[in-house]
Amino acid sequence: MIKRCLAGAYQPLIGTALFLEYEDVMSRETLFAGSPLSKTDRNEVFAGFLAVCRWTEVYFAWRPNLPDEADNHLFELAVAGGADAVITRNVRDLAGGELRFPRIRVLTPEQCLERFP
């Protein structure tokens, strides 16, 4: 997915909450213990990814009441940016909200590659 974003096939959205979440994940050294990429390499890929993201301001707090409250920001970002989909490995939790956004699909990376080649 990141490779396709860097090539311009997809226009990822980024906002404050998602940026902070990515930054936190990138700082977890134990998460990358088996990675062939060095910290410098990972930071370069991350910087490249951020360079192709469209910064999106979220002005309205939608609350789909997802099982994990911390995931609600993903729908706020998707609505604010007019996204077609939220791409995640956490499909079950994101598809389980009370407030529905019929135009926004929740897809795994593999499903995204199939539906939006």
Image (cartoon, grey):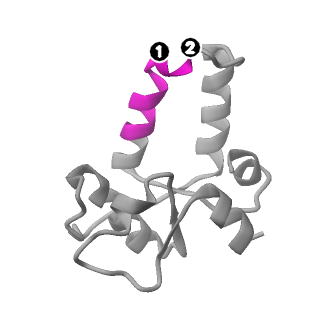
The quarter of the image holding the C terminus is bottom right
Are the two marked residues, 2 and 1, in contact with CB atoms closer than 8 angstroms?
yes
Residue sitting at the far front: 92
* Up/down of 30 relative to 77, above or below: above
- 67 or 117, which lies in front? 67
Q: Position of residue 71 (x, y in %)?
A: 31, 54
Q: Quadrant of residue 10?
A: bottom right
- 45 or 30, which lies in front? 30
Kind of residue at badge 1: Thr
Q: Which residue is mark 1?
A: 30
Residue shown at 37% from the left, 69% from the top: 95
Q: Position of residue 81 (x, y in %)?
A: 46, 70
Residue sitting at the far bottom: 102
SS state under label 2: loop
Residue shown at 61% from the left, 34% from the top: 47
Q: Is residue 29 magenta?
A: yes
| Left or right: residue 79 compared with residue 32 | left
**What's the mark number on residue 33?**
2
Magenta span: 20-32
Determine crowd level at label 1: few under 14, some 14-19, many 20+ residues with C-alpha closer than 10 A: few
Kind of residue at badge 2: Ala
Residue shown at 44% from the left, 60% from the top: 91
SS state under label 1: helix
Q: Position of residue 84 (x, y in %)?
A: 54, 75
